[in-house]
Image: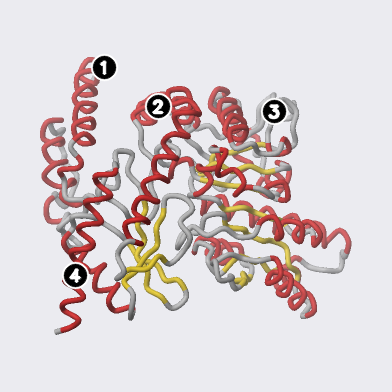
Amino acid sequence: MNASEFRRRGKEMVDYVANYLEGIEGRQVYPDVEPGYLRHLIPATAPQEPEKFEDIINDVERIIMPGVTHWHSPYFFAYFPTASSYPAMLADMLCGAIGCIGFSWAASPACTELETVMMDWLGKMLELPEAFLAGKSGEGGGVIQGSASEATLVALLAARTKMIQKLKTTSPELTQAAIMDKLVAYSSDQAHSSVERAGLIGGVRLKAIPSDGNFAMQASALQEALQRDKAAGLIPFFVVVTLGTTSCCSFDNLLEVGPICNKEDLWLHIDAAYAGSAFICQEFRHLLNGVEFADSFNFNPHKWLLVNFDCSAMWVKKRIDLTGAFKLDPVYLKHNHQDSGLITDYRHWQIPLGRRFRSLKMWFVFRMYGVKGLQAYIRKHVQLSHEFESLVRQDPRFEICAEVTLGLVCFRLKGPNRLSKALLERINSVKKIHMVPCHLRDKFVLRFAICSRSVESTHVQLAWEHIRELAGEVLSAEKE
């Protein structure tokens, strides 16, 4: 494909994408395929000779689209949103065209410097403390990770390295293996499974702190665990506070947990993967109060801030804590400016070496929507979730299972769990809408998350009428 054909095919692809998104409401939200459906539709080996672009596009509809779950359908209410916007898509095109691998400033100065500035822009939108911003001479700063899972792992590994170095300095007789055997990290029992995975990869034990009646970690429960573990000779070193849990969007008590972490010299990491986007709105900013106690903070603009995946924003107060854990400097990666203090090399902030020019998406989206446009988008989703909550509360057959703070409503049919399980099974079998469940204590709960950029009140109302109708079928079958 030469430049001339690329121009033509590129325009065709933009038309295809625009038509797909404009017509996505008419597509079944969840596919009718079984595992292994695709293999027999394509050859067992790659073609020896070039094929036509038209044939490939035809196969997208014939082979790919039948197996796509349409996350951007206004009838998709599962998981949490994944962001999508036209400015971000255009920026991704440019990112692919530039094609730099921005592991260092020298590898592409604009890639590094735009990311630093965009992370400062976003930090200021969130009103983060100055310590988290790079500015012109700050000790902190932000970095784009691939996911919140990555950010949690990076924070845990940095905290582990920092504690090991500290203990080996104060107690030289201790070996690294002996220290590792005693390290312990903490999170709420409502924390995402990626936190537990970070502990597995990091080779440290992770303890789940029992949450309270609002599914939040309280300082008193953490303090009890710390005292118990220190008395047993263990070494606490890392705490994850979740703001907006995956199951029900609950919020750990950061204002009380934070001071304990500071007093005990524990690395405090905040995981606000979904909820963090809402903190750009003044009415939700209080949910981030206490961030000043944290060592690191992360949320995903690629969930709810119209920046397409992947773009997970992570800040640290002291970037040397990250670079101290990951820095390796082979001669082939060195450059003349790396020790100038004016720039940073992001390869030292992350697990991979290579990285895409992801900050272009932030730059395009922030400029084309403006802060006010992004705030309006968040507020619309929150308003729609409260509309759905109101509909649920009007039906005495249902109950709300957790406080509705942002764009997630957790609800269930009253009675035994089998009723809600049967309801969800019917919902996802009919495939008019798509939802996923969670467990809150011993209750099987349905999650209704406002996800699509194109979702409107009419879609929420149609979804509710569909749920009510299927609930009636479930309850009628129960009586038979």
Q: Which residue is labeled 4 in the image?
A: 472
Where residue 15 sits in the image (x, y, percent)?
Answer: 20, 26
Tell me the mark number nearer the camera, choosing from 2 and 4: 4
Left or right of residue 315: residue 299: left
Q: Which residue is labeled 3 in the image?
A: 135
Q: Secondary structure at mark 1?
A: helix
Hey, what amino acid is under mark 2?
A: Ala
Hey, what amino acid is under mark 1?
A: Ala
The answer to whether mark 4 and mark 1 are in CB contact below 8 A is no
Q: Secondary structure at mark 3?
A: loop
Q: Which residue is labeled 2 in the image?
A: 91
| Corner quadrant of residue 318 | top right
Few, some or many residues within 10 Å of mark 2 (<14, 14–19, 20+):
many
Q: How far apart are the two marked residues, 2 and 1, measured between alpha carbons? A: 19 Å
Q: Which residue is labeled 1 in the image?
A: 3
Hey, what amino acid is under mark 3?
A: Gly
